Image (cartoon, coloured by chain):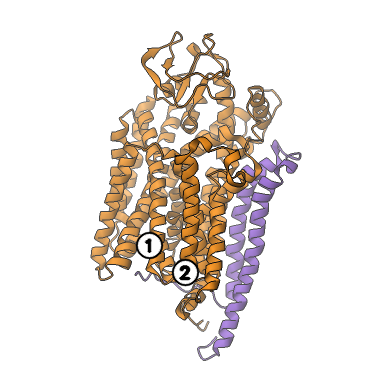
Amino acid sequence: MVEDESADSASETRRAYWRANLRLLGTLMAIWFAVSFGAGILFRPYLDQFMLGGFPLGFWFAQQGSIYVFIVLIAIYAWRMHRIEREFALDDDDAETPIEGG
Amino acid sequence: MATQTLIYLFVGLSFALYIGIAIWSRAASTSEFYVAGGGVNPVVNGMATAADWMSAASFLSMAGLIAFMGYDGSVYLMGWTGGYVMLALLLAPYLRKFGQFTVPDFIGTRYYSNIARTVAVVCLIFISFTYIAGQMRGVGIVFSRFLEIDVTLGVILGMGIVFFYAVLGGMKGITYTQVAQYCVLIFAYLVPAIFISLLATGNPVPQLGLGSELADGSGMSVLQKLDSSLVDMGFPAYTDGSKSMVDVFCITAALMIGTAGLPHVIVRFFTVPKASDARKSAGWALVFIALLYTTAPAVSAFARLNFNESVSNTRYAEAPDWFRNWEANGLIAWRDKNGDGVMQYEAGEAFEGAPEYTPGGIGVSGERLLDNAATDNANEVYVDRDIMVLANPEIANLPGWVIALVAAGGLAAALSTAAGLLLVISTAVSHDLLKSTFRPQISEKGELLAARVAATAAIVVAGILGIYPPGWVAQVVAFAFGLAAASLFPAIFLGIFSKRMNREGAIAGMVTGLAFTFLYIAWFKLWAPELNTAEHWLFGISPEGIGVVGMLLNFAVAITVARLTAPPPPEVDALVENIRVPRGAGTAHAH
């Protein structure tokens, strides 16, 4: 992009970028909710009838599984966002945002 | 070598390491003091965040709590890890892009108001001091049990160490010390866990050992054995718990959101070079935290099994050494109700309240006599949940060096968190109150001096809280998370995701959330503790989980008030636009 491009198109890019970000956020936060509050709490009594090795399944989600999924969610977000940012040329690859101080 | 010598050696060596790092990484500017110059590698920052986050509560208390709560203990496991997903996705990258030093900085600038900034500072100081008091209790427990020195001397020693690297090094010193402390504490946590898992199940990975068959030839899995033995003793099954579903849901949510709103955690993401690094850093932090948090439930289950087996129906005269050691420290007690000299361990309180020993009173079997009124159930054993992690290596008969390692790890966990909190408090005073509100003309040198003076004062107050722990400390730990969830989180979240949110809405929301949560917790914990039972709670939500309702009220009030008042000025609109994209200044540049 160049400096003299119209402000409208720059802000259109930003809006599209923000929408893509919100879509990704929505999907990942839904999974976040499903594994912890869903599988680990609300559906735990039902899931506990299935066994995962020596673990009742709901109990496993509450004390082990949800934590593993949390890590994967952050990894996916960092990776996907980086791609989205490059697509819209809004990444910070070559930038160091300095701390200005107050 | 004797275990005691090993403890001195391990603790001494780890302290020498922290001091060495502090001298090497002294801070020269306010930027280095507050945010380590904003140039910390995301993996290093993730590790430092993990040490900052995992406090004496995570290291010492959590596994013990889970051991006695079973499934209900999941609230801590999910709550204290799930918050990092919210941090990484909803807060950290935007706050880093904002590019200043503190959480009140963000709130004050985004809501163009020094009142909003001051409300945020008040929340922050209150949350941090509540938290720090808990750390000091952890330091006290470790010192009194393992170093066999007076708790007062122990706390002064611990404070001296923190003073050295927090006041000299600021965030820069703290960050690199915390990396060392993470290594010490995770090693100290994993080694005994691996040993115990191997002994109990033959599987060296504790996370898998928890789901394995016991090696005692019974053909039962760890959890089956726990469930059946606990039910026999009159407890609820380990995998079932006793809290209501709505309460488990709300406590988990309050801890998650509170984690995402804790100022000493958020400020860590101001130290990385770029907004995209803040996301990576939160991911790494969770990886390092998960290493301990997925091990903890295994430690809990094995500890409970071993504890049941070595205490239940054992003659006091044949009780293992650790039982008497902790009894001498007042954290275990046995009251021989039926006079048979054998310890009956079952559900229910053995006597009323915390143990009060008859001075010099020794019973027929050699136990310390108690003044407490006995209860009429069959249980004779009192045990403080905080001892489980510290006692675990002894209960499992592990070698002396493992016990020494755990002592050093417990201190690392408590000191690293205390240092992070002290820094947040001193920054709030020197930067948010002095520089931004009362004396904007102060020089950088003057501000740095003020930060060091404030850190020193905060250390003294924290030390006094550790030496004379007020009775309410344990009662108000729920404050820190509930208040963070109900006050700071919605203000930050709306500041990023809603352009329409204005000064009036944010202040009204914060004050409502804070006041409601504060009053609810104070009512049940301080003013009317006798009413603190499920039938008196609002919607069956305990004070631990009420922060969620406070947060919802905050959101509702903030959005309503913002609709009815003037929208924020155009420069705030531009600020929000700017923090939403990772790339530098207003317009995108040619690639």
Q: Is residue B350 left or right of residue B148?
A: right
Pick the residue in front: A54 or B228: B228
> What residue would you read off at disc 1?
B118
Residue B221, quarter of picture: top right
Residue type, label 2? Glu
Above or below, B446 relative to B316: below
Query: Which chain shows up in purple?
Result: A
> Where is residue B447 shown, x and y percent of the image?
27, 63
Secondary structure of residue under mark 2: helix
Q: Is residue B350 left or right of residue A101?
A: right
> What residue would you read off at disc 2?
B504
Residue lying at 24% horizontally and 68% vertically, measured from the top left: B443
State which chain disc 2 sits on. B
Above or below, B27 relative to B243: below
Pick the residue in front: B440 or B449: B440
Residue type, label 1? Thr
Q: Nearer the viewer, mark 1 or mark 2?
A: 2
Q: Earlier in the sequence, mark 1 or mark 2?
A: 1
For chain B, the rendered hue is orange
Quarter of the rendering occupied by the N terminus of chain B: top left
> Where is residue B158 shown, x and y percent of the image?
32, 41
